[in-house]
Each structure stands twice: as structure tokens, then as C-alpha cells.
Amino acid sequence: MIDFSYSELQDNVRQMVHWFAENEVRPIALAADRTHRIPDEFIRKVKEIGLSMGPVPKEVGGEGGGAGEKKDKKGTRQNNRLSVIGAEEMAWGDPAVILCLPGPGLGGPPVNIMGTKEQKERFLGIFTRPEPLWGAYGLTEPGAGSDVAGIRTTAVKDGDHYLLNGTKCFITNGARASWVVVFATVDRSKGRAGHRAFMVEKGTPGFSVGKLEEKMGLRASETAELVLDNVRVHQDNLLGGEAYYEGKEGFMGAMKTFDSTRPMVAAMAVGIARAAYERAVEFAKEHFELGRPIGRYHYVQELLARSKRRIDASRLLVYRAAWMADAELPNAKEASMSKAYAARTAVEVLSDVVQVMGAAGVVHDHFVEKWFRDIKVYDIFEGTGEIQRIVISKRILKDLKSF
Ligand SMILES: Cc1cc2nc3c(=O)[nH]c(=O)nc-3n(C[C@H](O)[C@H](O)[C@H](O)COP(=O)(O)OP(=O)(O)OC[C@H]3O[C@@H](n4cnc5c(N)ncnc54)[C@H](O)[C@@H]3O)c2cc1C
């Protein structure tokens, strides 16, 4: 009924990205964590081999997600499946470095979903240039994290322009991005129907970077506060144009982004958990206590077996959600299931791996200590675990009127 094998293309992508992760990403990851920066030389290499954070569509001159425009045997596109396969391998290399890769990033999906042809050319076309460039996604605000509907950044029409005022926080690549998709409200009393998405370009007067966060994990990845103080953007920067917003399109565009990105984030969590689990297996074979490798002890075996079965189960949820996105089937529930399960699993696997490794698991010169710090955020960003469970249960109970 179901074929669990990779196609030739999927396997090539998996092997190519794995090679890169092992030979180019791992060697820079510990230093990047300590210095909070990625070497320019590494970014140049990433650009040269054509790796990008988020696909650049073919219609604007990009590759459409690597070789992603090639369809599978059944004629279904496979961009999302190739992305999750690649994301697992890159995160296996390092979960922070992957977030620093140039490309539209989380900002790409809203432009693709809501943008006009001209906006796609203008804002996604830049990623075909030889220099490394970044895009970003600005939704979260102080006081509006999980409560997306509660954003307070305002957009007031002024002739052909809008004036934006507010603060966005925790924005990945926010300081280095050439543009940020900024979600704002034109009328708070309208709730979600007041939401609009604006393309705000770096260097626009009044648009500045506040603080850069010092984080527990993912320290190589830039997380910025962005301040909008009377930022004047032309109406051409309103994604989709004014006619696009009849109802809750702005809010829905922000949410639809997650249908493709949550499986990606879940895949990264699988990659980190797998990397840690593999290290624990090696450790269990080479580390002796009471004259035996610790892998001979039942409790260690149980921790490893539990990790392995939950990592594999996570990956299956990820592949299903990605396949549904490729097949253009509604997948919000499945995307949230993959994210909720994989992120939680990865947090628990990392805890178990540190336990198996004892003191060796908590010292700075081992990846496991770093991954333990890195993984927690995967259960927080792109919607916390609790929010994923709400998304899932709302869809399960959609006929229950009082919900
Ligand atoms: C490293 C990093 C990178 C990020 N990158 C971006 C980015 O690029 N762009 C962007 O826009 N945002 C980004 N974020 C923000 C991220 O999406 C938010 O942190 C996340 O949505 C949670 O919001 P919050 O931190 O305000 O927590 P809160 O929403 O305040 O949640 C606090 C706690 O309350 C729980 N909670 C909240 N509401 C409910 C509810 N209704 N029911 C049950 N429990 C609830 C939460 O699950 C959580 O446990 C990033 C965050 C981090 C840490």
C-alpha cells in the first residue's frame, strides 16, 4: 500500500546534504556556537553549491527548491519532501548553522502565498544573485507570541503609503535580512480581519534593529528585535495588494506559512535527535563500567530503544505532512502533529542521551551538551507544543460548537 523507499532524486539530495553537513557544517559548529557567528567562507560555499534556506521559485529565476520542481513517479511535485529530507540532514550537521543559511527563510512562504507576480519577482528574485542575502518573517511581538491575533503593530494609510509603528521580537535573521515580512493591523477592532502583511526593506527610515538576543541555545543564529518608528512603506509593499484583503487573508497568510514550515522544523528536530542518538549508541559501545560496555545494561538499552522508535515515528509524521503539502492537500493538523511530536521527542531524546553519557554529556567540548541547549527552542518557535496541540484538537473537534 505504501512505499517507504526514497526515490533516486530524494536519495541523492539526502546523501549530498549529509556529505555537506558532515564535512562542512560539523567542523564549524562548536566555534560558531561560542563566537555567535558563521564564517563568511562557509556562507560563500553554501551559496556556491546552491543551498538555500527556503526555495526560490522557478518563475523568478530560482531553482524551485533545488531539484524540487521535478515530479515524483505519480506526477506529484516533491519540493516539500526534498526540503524535509535536506533539513533533517543539515540539522544533523548542526541545528543553529542551518538557521543561518542565506535565502528567503520563513519570509518566503508568505510572499509565495500572498504576493503578486511583481512582488515575487521583486522580493524573491534577489535570491538568484551571487551574493548571500536573507529574508525574514516578523510576526511575534512582546505580548503577542502564541496569541498571534493580538498583534499591536499598526499600519495607517497615508496617501499611497502606509505608516507602520510597533516592535517585533525574536526575529530570526532579522538584522541581516534585506527585507522582513511585517504583520501589522490596520484596525485592531476588526481582530484578524485587520491583519496585513508588509514587505519592509532594510534601510527604510525608521526601521531599526533593537537588541540581538543572547540565547541559551542556537547561539550562532541571529535573533533580533526590530523597531518600526513611523516607517513609511509604499502600498506596492502590501503583500497581495489592497484588493487581496476581503476578510482574514492577512492572518490566514501568516498561518498558512506554517503548513510548509512546521514539517521543516519538525524535520530539523528529527535531525538533532538522530545525531544525539547516534552519538549515544557509539558511547554505549565504547564506554565501560564494571568491566562491561554500558550498552550491555538493560536501562541503557531501554533509553536507546525508546529514542530510536520515537525518532523513526517522528520522521514518518514529518514525511506524511510534507507529502500532503506536495499533493496540495490541507495539512494544518498533520503539520502540527509532526511538529508537536518531533520537537517533544527530540527534547526527551536529548535528555536521555545526556543521561546515557553521564558527565561526558554535559561538558562544552562535546556536541551533545550544545545540542541539549539547542533543542529546547524547537518546542517553542513556530508555535509552542501547547499551541500545536490546540491546532490539532480544534481540527479533531471542529464540529463541537462550544469549543
Ligand atoms: C530562537 C527563536 C527564533 C524565533 N524566530 C522567530 C521569527 O523568525 N519570526 C517570528 O515572528 N517569531 C519568531 N520567534 C518567536 C516564537 O515564534 C515565539 O517565541 C513563540 O510563538 C511563543 O511565543 P512567546 O515566546 O511569546 O510565548 P507565549 O505565547 O507567551 O507562551 C508562554 C507559554 O504559555 C503557553 N500558552 C500561551 N498561550 C496558550 C494557550 N492559548 N493555551 C495554552 N498554553 C498557552 C505557551 O505554550 C508557553 O508555554 C522565535 C523565537 C525564538 C526563541
Image (cartoon, rainbow, N blue to C red):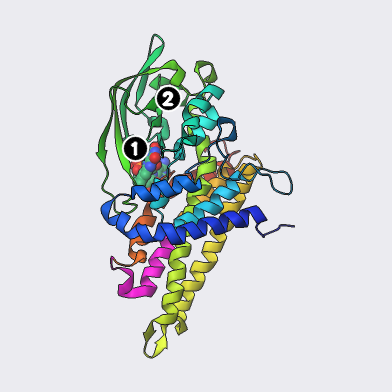
According to the picture, the residue beneath numbered tag 1 turns out to be 176
Task: Identify the element where label 2 is drawn.
Answer: strand
- Mark 1 or 2, which is nearer the eye? 1
Question: In front: 176, or 169?
Answer: 176
Mark with earlier residue (1, 2) = 1
Q: Is residue 231 left or right of residue 95?
A: left
According to the picture, the residue beneath numbered tag 2 turns out to be 198
Where 360 falls versus 313 (above or below)?
below
From the top left corner, tell me how far across and down residue 194 is, in percent.
Answer: 44, 22
- Classify mark 1: residues with Cα within 10 Å, few (<14), some (14-19) or many (20+): some
Where 388 falls versus 243 (above or below)?
below
How would you classify the magenta stretch by its main secondary structure?
helix
Q: Quadrant of residue 136?
A: top left
From the top left corner, tell me how far across and down residue 402 is, in percent.
Answer: 53, 36
Tag 2: residue type? Phe
Cα distance, mark 1 to mark 2? 18 Å
Residue that appears at 46% across and 58% down:
21
Q: Is residue 158 left or right of residue 267?
A: left
Where 290 falls versus 20 (above or below)?
below
Tag 1: residue type? Arg
Question: In front: 2, or 18?
Answer: 18
State the extent of the magenta-drawn residues as a range: 344-364
